[in-house]
Image (cartoon, rainbow, N blue to C red):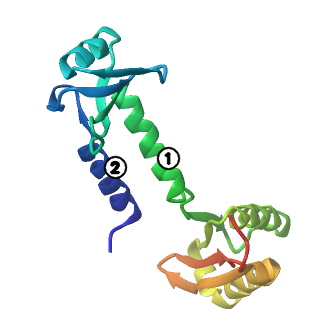
Amino acid sequence: MLSPARAFIERSQAIAKSLRLNDLIRISPVRVIDQEEHQLGIIPTAEALSLAREAGLDLVEVSPTEKPPVCRIMDYGRHMYEKKKRLKVSAGSHTVTLKEIRIRPKTDPHDREIKLNRAKAFLEQGHKVQFTMLFRGRERFQRERSMGIFDSLVAELGEAIKLERAARMDGRRMTMVVAPVKHKGAHA
């Protein structure tokens, strides 16, 4: 299975391969549309190419199957940029990222509340949140207290989240990952 980024690249390359431009257009005559969307009619390819060069633009074959083929005078680079942008938007450009909230066992309850509000904002945007508790010295031997803090965070977040990875120790830190619950019928 292709990653979304790889699929996007392959789609944009397929678009680029499908259009012929400038000297690659071999068929003559062609129907030409200028940069202001006016039809110039059916003219020889060499003449259409010279019109495009005078305007500092490209002659692009946009409809090769028509008789005669339809060519447009345009800025090809800008056209490809806009086409890729449209593809990206139609593919759903919102990517879920993992946001990290760092706390310590000695973090004040008010400071923890501020960090919890920040996590709620991330979750509302559709991001996953990783809570990381950093330990110093003997703090890592107080696992029950740390698990209690994580449990209280999950309880405060309530039904809006699902626990994706339960709290676990990893060296001098404890991590937990939560993700937003996607409601049926809700459109992001």
Q: Secondary structure at mark 2?
A: helix
Q: Quadrant of the N terminus?
A: bottom left
Dot 2 amino acid type:
Ser
Q: Please state the horizontal and vertical placement of residue 101, each as a whole percent of the image.
A: 64, 65
The quadrant of the image that shows the C terminus is bottom right
Q: Earlier in the sequence, mark 2 or mark 1?
A: 2
Q: Quadrant of residue 146?
A: bottom right
Residue 12 — which label? 2
Q: Viewed as shown, does residue 30 lie left or right of 171? A: left
Q: Which residue corresponds to mark 1?
A: 86
Q: Please, is residue 77 above or below residue 137 in the view?
A: above
Residue 95 horizontal/vertical position (percent)? 54, 61
* Type of the residue with mark 1: Arg
- Relative height, residue 115 to residue 22 (above, below): below
Q: Nearer the viewer, residue 83 or 136?
A: 83
Left or right: where 90 falls relative to 2: right
Q: Nearer the viewer, residue 120 or 17?
A: 17
Regarding mark 1 in the picture, which secondary structure is present there?
A: helix
Residue that appears at 35% across and 61% down: 7
Picture layout, residue 87 above or below residue 53: below
How far is disc 2 from disc 1 in space, using C-alphas?
11 Å
Q: Residue at x 79, y 64 (%)?
A: 117
The disc placed on residue 104 is none
Label 2–label 1 contact, CB within 8 A = no
Relative image position of residue 111 (x, y in whole percent): 80, 62
Residue drawn at 18 percent across, 27 percent down? 28
Quadrant of the image occupied by residue 26: top left
Task: Residue 128: give x, y in percent of width and height.
Answer: 61, 70
